[in-house]
Image (cartoon, rainbow, N blue to C red):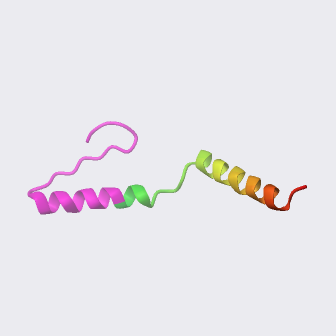
Amino acid sequence: MLGGQSAFQAIAQDFTSFEQEILAKIGREITEVPEPGTLVLLGLAVAGLAYRRYGS
């Protein structure tokens, strides 16, 4: 896969090394820090739940 913000290039000698490269890529994507927009949506959802429970 080439091009784009999260692009990478992995050269694999065989299927085993290809699997290891793909698993490493997936691991990097999962552990990335969420974008600010995601955090804002999460914050709004929590605030909405708190208001619904404790609000008037």
Quadrant for the N terminus in the image? top left
Residue at the farthest left position: 14
Q: Position of residue 40 (x, y in %)?
A: 66, 48
Q: State the residue at coordinates (8%, 58%).
A: 14
Q: Is residue 28 above or below residue 44?
A: below
Q: Is residue 48 left or right of residue 13?
A: right
Q: Is residue 3 magenta?
A: yes
Q: Position of residue 7 (x, y in %)?
A: 33, 43
Q: Position of residue 23 (x, y in %)?
A: 28, 61
Q: Is residue 49 above or below residue 5?
A: below
Q: State the residue at coordinates (85%, 62%).
A: 54
Q: Position of residue 33 (x, y in %)?
A: 52, 56
Q: State the residue at coordinates (11%, 58%).
A: 15
Quarter of the image where one finds residue 30 = bottom left
Q: Is residue 6 magenta?
A: yes
Observer-nearest of 14 and 9: 14
Residue at the farthest top position: 3
Q: Is residue 32 left or right of residue 56?
A: left
Q: State the residue at coordinates (30%, 61%).
A: 24
Q: Is residue 33 left or right of residue 24?
A: right
Residue at the farthest right position: 56
What range of the chain is rendered magenta? Answer: 1-26
Quadrant for the C terminus in the image? bottom right
Q: How many marks?
A: 0
